[in-house]
Amino acid sequence: MRACRVAARRPAGTERSGALRGYTMHKDDYLSRLRRVEGQVRGLQRMIDEDTYCIDVLTQIASVSKALQGVGLGLLDEHLRHCVRRAAEASDVEGDEKVHEAVQAIERLLRA
């Protein structure tokens, strides 16, 4: 028997719509960086398939992790400068919600 899953409530202002996001102006840059990461991950798959030396694989994993962290930090910066600032200007309650949301995102990034 499958457990019933309750859909997570999305924080205010995070619904999917045509709204501009904080990173919209740099979207092409982020997509380009993520495509490079995708290529690095495919390279990792090849390395494993070809029985590459463990340390070389681990070095590449560290490189991929750093690249993803860079994308995450860039998005976080955009979120703080755009979304959090805009919410704080709208009202204290909205600002507090966005700050809380950002803190949770930072916590997730640090645990990863």
Image: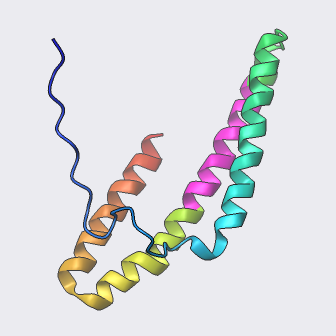
Q: How is the image coloured?
A: rainbow
- Left or right: residue 53 compared with residue 75: right
Residue that appears at 53% across and 70% down: 77
- Left or right: residue 66 compared with residue 21: right
The x and y percentages for residue 69 are: 60, 50
Q: In the depicted view, which residue is nearer to us: 96 or 15? A: 15
Q: Is residue 53 above or below residue 25?
A: above
Q: In the depicted view, which residue is nearer to us: 77 or 111? A: 77
The x and y percentages for residue 74 are: 59, 64
The x and y percentages for residue 109 are: 46, 49
What is the chief secondary structure element of the magenta stretch?
helix
Q: Is residue 66 above or below residue 95?
A: above
Q: How many marks?
A: 0
Residue that appears at 64% across and 66% down: 27
- Return the residue found at the far bottom: 89
> Which residues are drawn in magenta?
58-73
- Return the residue found at the far front: 18
Q: Is residue 22 above or below residue 48?
A: below
Q: Is residue 87 above or below residue 42?
A: below
Dividing the picture into quarters, in which one does residue 97 lie?
A: bottom left
Q: Quadrant of the N terminus?
A: top left
- Left or right: residue 25 compared with residue 42: left
- Left or right: residue 65 compared with residue 48: left
The x and y percentages for residue 105 are: 39, 55
Dividing the picture into quarters, in which one does residue 44 lie?
A: top right
Dividing the picture into quarters, in which one does residue 52 lie?
A: top right
Q: In the depicted view, which residue is nearer to us: 77 or 42? A: 42
Q: Is residue 11 magenta?
A: no
Q: In the depicted view, which residue is nearer to us: 62 or 81? A: 81
Residue that appears at 72% across and 32% down: 41
